Each structure stands twice: as structure tokens, then as C-alpha cells.
Image: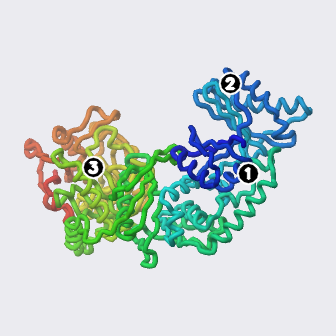
Amino acid sequence: MTDFFATAPRGLEELLAAELRDLGLASARVQRGGVAFSESLAAAYRACLWSRLANRILLPIARFEAQDEQALYDGVQGIDWSAHLGVDNTLAVDFTGVRARVGHGRFAQQRVKDAVVDQLRDASGARPSVDTDQPDVRVNVHMMDAAVTVAIDLSGDSLHQRGYRREGRRAPLKENLAAAMLLRGDWPALAAEGGALVDPMCGSGTLLIEAAWMATDTAPGLLRTRFGFHYWRGHDDSLWKPLIDEALERQARGAQTPPTILGFDQDEEAVTVSRDHLRRAGLTDWVQVECGELSQLQRSAERPHGLVITNPPYGQRLAEQHELVPLYLSLGQTVKTQFAGWRAMVLNGSGCALGLKPARSWQLFNGPIECRLERFEVQAGIGEAPPAQDLVNRVQKNQRQLKKWLAREDVHAYRVYDADIPEYALAVDVYNTQAGRWLHVQEYAAPASVDAGKAQARLRAALTVLPRALETAPSKLVYKVRQRQRGERQYQRLAQQDQYLEVREGPCRLLVNLTDHLDTGLFFDHRPVRQWIGENARGKHFLNLYAYTGAATVQAGLGGAASTTSVDLSKTYLAWLQRNLHRNQLNSPAHAHIQADVMAWLQHCDQRYDLIFLDPPSFSSSKRMDGNLDIQRDHGALIRAAAACLSEDGLLIFSTNRKGFKLDPALQAQFRIEDRTAWSIPKDFQRRAWVHGCWFIR
């Protein structure tokens, strides 16, 4: 018997030990970083061919103590390397360490290579070459404190590389982690009982292929043409060939009764990649992959039991996790409603809830990402009331009431719900874009008196039902938590997707971004004011203060303004404004944009404008500003400074959404002021009219 060691991903050591015992390696025992076993060389070959979980199978050839790099070199030199490779072979060295006395891994790796090469060169006058990509012999050195273990890597490339994936194409889920998910879900037993398997977000098809190979008794290493032992001088081909013959016979028998395995993905490119991998794995006739939305997935009555298994996206930034909440809830709802009586396995790296309680869960690591592998036993929901039905009723009622107005006013982006029901403190906006209908859902911060657990349950229910209630794909729902932004946070990005969608507003084509910022680039409540500006700007010189992304500027430009000037402190928003101008063929010198603190810029403004739109933030502070802005405190000075830039018959439109705002009475003595608040509030914002104010000032 010879000692061997199988390395494993973190969290899979116990599962790997059980797998190796099932392969006949009765001595398998868990150790740090993997599983040790004392067996024959043929058993080690069997592990290379059949293990679905191991990364590498190592053959230790020496153990010694090394207090420094010279002792490491001497210890490696003490091994008879002619028993393992010759000067015509290529060589690579892998070095790992835990509190290693030789602290620099690259240097230790170099010293090990030198020791091997120097010994062979001293004996023969020639030396082997180094090939880090595909060496004939790969040497593995592990150092814990001063204890060194030198081993021959019988695997070569990591065993998770099955041989079907195209070179350079990486998967978000390694094959051995996919196998672990299937084994934790007892897929082999379910398949033997005639159960089916469905992956609703199959990506590149990793889970589908691993499931098919398990169910048809196909060795995961059967496609590989090269293992680490093939050019090792200790290799015994008479032990290896019978294992291959046996694996081919088992595969032929297993292929006679393949299970039903289905994969779906909304991404057409992912479906194409999956089909390519299935073809290369020889599974085209056994596994079916289709393009489809998660919410449209339905179980056939012909498949009464089986396994739903998937690795949904994670999202490492907080904002991305918020965007994933609806996706996970949609997954949970689909599993619950369509797969009663089935088992479900989800590798959850986001922390988002599915709205289902897992029967069991395990900690796993997908690369550096800590995940929970969650197992659900899906019970039939007979007699359950539909979730959040009161919210569904209200949203659909609002939609019906807005329908004629939307058509008459040619409105394509609007608010359909705004915390109408106190228990659902959400704002729900609909964006009908050139890329289809999207929902933008913002959660208002709940008061301290609201039970956090109940609030979360209602939120999960709301995000689950809103896509279907508004006939929108769940993947096109973006969820955010609405919080007041101060200082530089006003301009901070929440995500980095750079996904811009085009939405129409009258004659304008405007870009919105639902994911990367708290606001989307378009304030719906100013729609009537922008429309009025477009209808009354012809021949006028227009000034847009706190211009944001320039929707009012575009309206003025398309309305025939002689010139437009847009001022904002944010470089991000001004770049966005410029894109909006270009989108509407307004990229001429007549349309200027200026990055500046508005108040400071107004102090030096020597031009006169016929029409000025002043819509400042309620609060603002920035390192680039002189002081900070509180619109209740500062609006008088701001209005006076802006009005000083008006032409003789010019008009200043001032608006604010500051809660509880009161216009300074002293302004009435200086200007002719007309309160246009009621007129300025669009139909989709009349439920919260009290937060908006608008005045025409001459």
C-alpha cells in the first residue's frame, strides 16, 4: 500500500472522503485540505478517473524538515529524481505554504526546481526543461511551518477540468463544485428512481453535464486525454487501461436509460455556449437547453418528481444585491408554484432570501466567495392565499386608471404606485423603453415602529408579485432602498453596469440608467413643466440650473430655443446630459453645458436669459462647493441671483420637492410670483401632491 492525498475545495472534504470510499478506497480519511488514503496505485488511478470532487491526486515521495531555503534545496536534492523523470521530460513545480519558513512562494518554487534540475544535470550533463502549462511531470511541494511534503501530481491539470470546455472559456461554477451540489441533492438516487432535473439558470451548462454524467454512470475523466501520471516514470499502463475499458462499458450501460434533464436561460449567448459544451461532452441527445425567462418556467405533468438545481448570480456590491432580490424571490416563487413535490438546490452567494425555508444548508466556497448551499423540500401550497394580493389589486387598479391618460398624453415612463398602502412602503415606476418594459422599485425606509421581520416578509411578497401584476419579466425589475443622499454620496455610483435604456417623453429621446445610481436620470414629477418649456421655448435663450441629465434642456432645444445653457456641479450628470443632446441631434454650439457650483456661477453671470428653470436639490454639499445648500434656508438668495440673469420679460420657473417647504414671503414684494403647484403635478403623482411645489417668477 502507498500513501496518497486528494486535495479538495474548502467545505468538500467530508463529501470527498465519502465519494472515495464509494469508489473502493476504504482507507480514505479527512485531513486538512483534503483526504488521505493508503491504497494501491490502481486505486489512485481510479480516483483520477472517477472522482467528481477532487482537485488533485498527489503521491507523496518525501517528507523532511526545512528551517530555511538552503535546507529546502538540500531536502529536495536528497530525492532520487531519476525514478520520476528524465532529462527529456518537461517539469513544473507548484508550491503552497502555511506559515512556511520559506515565506516567498515564488522563490521557494524556484529553489525546488533548481534542486531537481541540478541533480539530473550533475548525473547526465543535460537538464529537463520547464513547462508551466503542460509539463510531463508536475511536482507539488507543501510546507507547513518547517514540515515539507514533496509529491508527484498524478492529475496534471486540476481534475475539475473535464475536457469539454473550450480553451479560455471560464465558468462561474467549477465542475467539482457543481458535482457537490448534485450529490448534496441526492441526484444519483433521484435519477435512478426516474426523477427529472431542471436548471432554470443554466449558464454554460456545467450542472447539466455533471448531472447527465452522474445519471449515466460516466466517469468525469473519460474525455481527458492527458493525466499527470502519463509521462511519470512510475506509471504502469497495465493498471490504467483496464480502468478505461471498465469506464467505457459502464457508460454504455448507463446510456440506455438516460433521465430527463432540462436547462433554461434567458441569455441566448449562454444557451449557445451550453449547447456547444453539451455537443463536446457527447450529451446533445440526452440534455435539452432552451432560451426562456425564469417566470415562464412550468413543470410538465409527466415529471412528477425530481430536482431543481441552479447557481444564480451573486453580486458582490450591496447595490447589486438589491438588484438580485427580485430574481431570488422569483426563483423561490417559481420553485414553490411549479415544482411542488420536488427537491431544490440553490448555491446562494448573495445572501438574498428565496422566500422558502431551507431544510438543510452547507457552507461552500465558489472561489473566494463564501456561499450557502441550500436544500429545499418543496411542499404543495394547497389552499394558500396569493401573496400580497392587496398590493396586486391596488397596482392593477392604478394601472387601469392611468391607461387613458397615458395614451392621450403619450407618456411612456410613469409612477404606478407610491406607498398607497402603508404596509407596502414602495415607489413603483414603469419604464417602457426600446428594450421592453422595466420596473424600478424603491423601498422607503420603514419607521422604527414597524416590525423589521414583517416588513421584510411584505417586501419579499411585493417583489415577487409585482412583475406578474405589471406584465414584466422578473429580470427587468430593479430594486433599491431609497435613502436621502448628502454631500459626495449624491454622485456616487451604486453599481457599474453602464446599461442605458432609451425612453420617450413627447418628442424627446432620453437615456435612463436604472441600476448605477440612486436616481435614474429622469424625474417624472417634472414632466408637465418640461413639456411646457418645450412648448414655450421657441426663439428664447434658455438656462437650466442644476441641470441634472438635461431632460428640460432637450425639451427646450427640440422646442426651438435660440440657445440653451446647462449648469451642474456633477461631471457625471453633465456627460449624461451631453449624451441626451446627441441622442436628439442637438449637439451644436448653441447648446452649452458648464460644470460649476450654481450659486457661485450666478454671482459672475453677465448674460440674460428669457427662460430659466431652477430645480435645486433640497440639500447639497460637496468639496467643490462653497459651503452647502439647504433650499429652505437658501432659496431666497438663490432665486434673487437667478432672477438677476432674466431678460426684461423673462420667466424663472422655480420648483422643489422639499417636504414642508414654505416660500419666503419677502420674495412677494420683489417679484411677481404665480403659484403653479397644482398645475405642475402630473396625474401619476397626485397621490403625493404635498411633496411638490412650483412657482412662475417674473
Residue identifier under label 3: 482
Mark toward the start of the polypeptide (3 vs 2): 2
Q: Secondary structure at mark 1?
A: helix
**Mark 3 and mark 2: Cα distance apart in space:** 59 Å
Is residue 573 visible in this depiction of the protein? no
**Mark 1 and mark 2: Cα distance apart in space:** 30 Å
Q: Is residue 348 above or below residue 150?
A: below
Q: Residues within 10 Å of mark 3 (few under 14, many from 20)?
A: some
Three-letter code for the amino acid on which mark 1 is drawn = Ala
Mark toward the start of the polypeptide (1 vs 2): 1
**Mark 3 and mark 1: Cα distance apart in space:** 62 Å
Q: Residues within 10 Å of mark 2 (few under 14, many from 20)?
A: some
Q: At which x and y percent is residue 163?
A: 68, 58
Three-letter code for the amino acid on which mark 3 is drawn = Arg
Q: Is residue 502 left or right of residue 390?
A: right
Q: At which x and y percent is residue 347?
A: 46, 54
Q: Residue 65 shows which numbered tag?
A: 2
Residue identifier under label 1: 42
Q: Secondary structure at mark 3?
A: strand
- Confirm or deny contact between disc 3 and disc 2 (CB under 8 A): no
Mark toward the start of the polypeptide (3 vs 1): 1
Q: Residue at x 33, y 66 (%)?
A: 467
Q: Is residue 17 left or right of residue 508?
A: right
Q: At which x and y percent is residue 669?
A: 7, 44
